Image (tube, rainbow, N blue to C red):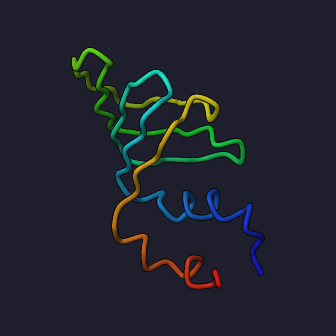
Amino acid sequence: MIKFSEIPIKLLQEAKPFIVTIETKNGEKYRGKLKSVEENMNIFLNNVIWQEKNGKTRKCDSIFLRGNCVKIIILPEILKEVPILNSIS
């Protein structure tokens, strides 16, 4: 059985082939394909659209975000169906 504290990382592992949106503590937003995630929530994205605080957007091939800078991660709706969430009672 999975520990409750392991669920966020396991869920992010399931999101690897999908597009995610990440907002950082400083208000910037990143949208791209989740390439990898580490246990400390460090995240590597590919094909990224980056929106700065002032609204200006840029495109990047890839970007690395430190886990301690992440405020929120928006996952695709399809992940509601992953088995890990069904194991929570």
Q: Does residue 84 appear left or right of residue 25 in this picture?
A: right
* Relative depth, front residue between 16 and 86: 86
Which residue lies at the image location 37% right of the left edge and 44% below the top edge? Answer: 21
Q: Residue at x 46, y 29 (%)?
A: 63
Q: Quarter holding the C terminus? A: bottom right
Q: x and y percent of residue 23 in the render?
A: 42, 35
In the rendered view, tell whether residue 31 sits above or below residue 17.
above
Front residue (pair 34, 79): 79
Whether residue 61 sits left or right of residue 84 in the image: it is: left
- Judge from the rendering whether residue 9 lies leftward or rightward of residue 54; answer left or right: right
Which residue is depicted at the point 74% across and 61% down?
5
* Residue 37 place in picture, x, y as percent: 59, 47
Q: Is residue 64 above or below residue 41?
A: above
Q: Residue at x 63, y 84 (%)?
A: 87
Number of dots carrying numbers: 0
Snapshot quadrant of residue 52: top left
Question: At which x and y percent is residue 41?
Answer: 64, 43
View extreme (front): residue: 89
Q: Quadrant of the N terminus?
A: bottom right
Closer to the camera, 78 or 60? 78
Nearest the camera: 21 or 71? Answer: 71
